[in-house]
Amino acid sequence: MEKLERVIKEFNRLHGSEAQAKILRFSDDEVIIEFTGSFCKTCGLYDYFEDISWDALDFGLKIKPVEILESEEDFEKGRYVVKYKVER
């Protein structure tokens, strides 16, 4: 869990003006992460979900987004809850 918290902190540092991530639930085989923010309109939304996976590799973790559990969008901001599989 400590490594994942560091991953989230790094993601928020890099993307904080557009998106913030927060761990909602963590287990041995899955992680649920909430993303909120305005998100860059010219970037692909899924790029944010993939970026967490790339950041995690730098900390020795392998996680892969597998499902968007919730999504709320309006003109200015959005909220997405994404399930990740923890790979061993």
Image (spheres, grey):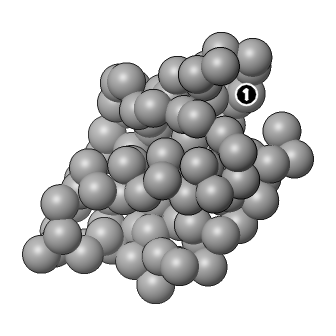
The amino acid sitting under disc 1 is: Phe
Which sits in the foreground, 61 or 9?
Answer: 61
- In depth, the one of 14 and 17 nearer the eye is 14
Which of the image's four quarters has the C terminus?
A: top right
The answer to whether residue 35 is visible is no
Describe residue 1's horizontal placement relative to residue 83 as left or right: right
Q: Residue furthest right?
A: 2
Residue at 30% from the left image edge and 46% from the top image edge: 72
Which corner quadrant of the image does residue 18 belong to?
bottom left
The one of 30 and 68 positioned closer to us in this rendering: 30
| Position above or below: 62 against 7 | above
- Residue 60, can we see it? yes
| Residue at 70%, 45% in the rendered image | 60
Question: Residue 77 at what x, y percent from top left?
Answer: 31, 67
Task: In the rendered view, tell whether residue 86 sits above or below residue 19.
Answer: above
Tell me what residue is drawn at x 39 percent, y 48 percent: 49
Q: Which residue is outermost to the left?
A: 42
Residue 10 relative to residue 72: left or right: right
Coordinates of residue 51 in the picture (x, y in percent): 42, 57
Indicate whether 35 appears above or below 70: below
Name the element at disc 1: strand
Q: Which residue is mark 1?
A: 26
The answer to whether 15 is drawn above or below residue 20 in the figure is: below
Dividing the image into 4 quarters, which one contains the N terminus? top right
Q: Quadrant of residue 47?
A: bottom left
**Residue that lies at the very extreme toward the top in this rendered image:** 29
x, y percent for residue 64: 45, 32
Q: Residues within 10 Å of mark 1 (few under 14, many from 20)?
A: some
Residue at horizontal 50 percent and vertical 29 percent from the top? 84
In this rendering, the count of numbered labels is 1
Indicate the position of residue 28 as horizontal and vertical percent values. Answer: 75, 17
